[in-house]
Image (tube, helix red, strand yellow):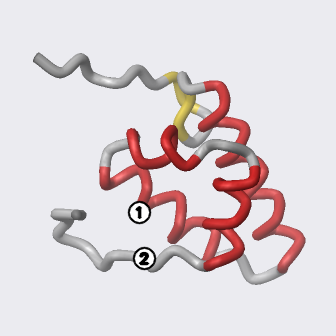
Amino acid sequence: MMKLSRAINPMPETIRLALSERGLMTAYEARPDYQRNDYLGWIARARLSSTQEKRLRQMLEELARGDVYMNMAWRPRKRI
């Protein structure tokens, strides 16, 4: 459950399917709430479908790598 102070972006079925088809749903769910929300909003705000597809591909690639978020180095926090 997200606990964000900004608007929560819903996940379109197309993104859900893309994550499932590529086996990346677990990687997506492991990301912090703000990252998941940012990815969804970023993709949804694209005006052109080609831009939405490009952003979706970037998100999928970053989730597959596991060490990148929005083209920036990222490391998950270790839970104690």
The answer to which of marks 2 and 1 sits earlier in the sequence is: 2
Reading the image, the residue beneath label 1 is: 37
Q: Is residue 8 depicted above or below 25 in this figure? A: below
What label sits on residue 9 in the rendered view? 2
Left or right: where does residue 28 sit relative to residue 62? left
**Nearer-the-camera pick, 37 or 48:** 37
Which amino acid type is marked by label 2? Asn
Residue located 76% across and 69% down the image? 52
What label sits on residue 56 in the rendered view? none
Residue located 16% across and 63% down the image? 3
Q: Is residue 76 depicted above or below 41 in this figure? A: above
Q: Is residue 19 depicted above or below 60 in this figure? A: below
Q: Position of residue 47 (x, y in %)?
A: 75, 83
Contact (CB < 8 A) between labels 2 and 1?
Answer: yes
Left or right: where does residue 50 sit relative to residue 29? right
Q: Residues within 10 Å of mark 1 (few under 14, many from 20)?
A: some
SS for callout 2: loop
Residue located 53% across and 58% down the image? 39
Which amino acid type is marked by label 1? Asn
Separation (CA) of disc 2 from disc 1: 6 Å
Task: Give the image quarter of residue 71.
Answer: top right
Left or right: where does residue 31 sit relative to residue 16? left
